[in-house]
Image (cartoon, rainbow, N blue to C red):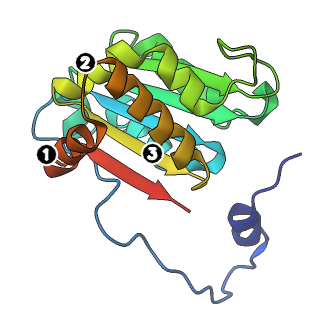
Amino acid sequence: AKKGICSNFLCDTKAGEEVNMTGPAGKVMLMPEEDPTTDYIMVATGTGIAPYRGFIRRLFVEKTPAAEVYKGEAWLFLGVANSDALLYDDEFQEAKSNYPENFRIDYALSREQENSKGGKMYIQDKVEEYADEVFGKLENGAHIYFCGLKGMMPGIQSMLKGVAEKKGLDYDVWLKGLKSKKQWHVEVY
């Protein structure tokens, strides 16, 4: 059994006990809902899946204004060690089954899959498999989100820089453009 630190703490807390909490700070992980055709690319490792569970529920499970009009594609990339660590997979599969045109999932299972170079399949390798499509979506206004352990970002950024250079793009200028248009969202810990 895999036990979460926070969730188990809360589950083990007795009714009426006082609990100190702090909430999200800032607006990094908000979903812009002005344009119902906006594509969302969500990249997570491990427990970094949590905000995306909320995104997916908001778009495909709950009766929300966003869900009623959403026509874009929400694309989830999740990296974990093996398939028994796929958190909320039943919920995601149901959303994919119910909304096949609007929800897509790709998993990077580092102890079960190999990347194109014969090494372990990490999250950056899985995203790189779809680099042309990801870059195209970003060019067309998609928002990309990263959440999980901060150790994922150097590999992600190195991969994105390599892809950008192959496409003849200056990575720093490209990234600055995404940030200035508020399409780049990072919440790592």
Q: Tell me the kind of residue under disc 1.
A: Lys
Q: Is residue 15 among what the camera can see?
A: yes
* Residue 177 x %, y %: 16, 43
Q: Amino acid at mark 2?
A: Gly
Residue neighbourhood size for the residue with mark 2, other residues' Cα within 10 Å, grouped as few (<14), some (14–19), many (≥20)? few
Give x and y (percent) for residue 173.
20, 42
Residue drawn at point x = 61 percent, y = 42 percent: 45
Residue denoted by label 3 = 146
On screen, residue 1 above or below 23: above
* Residue 181, disc: 1
Which of the 4 image quadrants contains residue 79?
A: top right
Q: Which mark is residue 136?
A: 2
Looking at the rendered image, the quarter that the N terminus falls into is top right
Residue 102 lies left or right of residue 71; in this view the side is right
Q: Residue, x 38% and y 43% (percent of image)?
A: 145
Q: Residue furthest right?
A: 1
**Left or right placement of residue 183 versus residue 85 in this view:** left
Three-letter residue code for mark 3: Phe
Q: Secondary structure at mark 1?
A: loop
Question: Closer to us: mark 3 or mark 2?
Answer: 2
Q: Quadrant of the C terminus?
A: bottom right
Rendered position, 162 above or below 87:
above
Query: Sequence-wise, which precedes: disc 1 or disc 3?
Result: 3
Seen at 62% across and 85% down, the residue is 19
Considering only order in the chain, which callout, 2 or 3, is on the residue closer to the N terminus? 2
Q: Tell which circle, 1 or 2, labels the residue nearer the N-terminal end.
A: 2
Q: Where is 176 relative to 159, above or below?
A: below
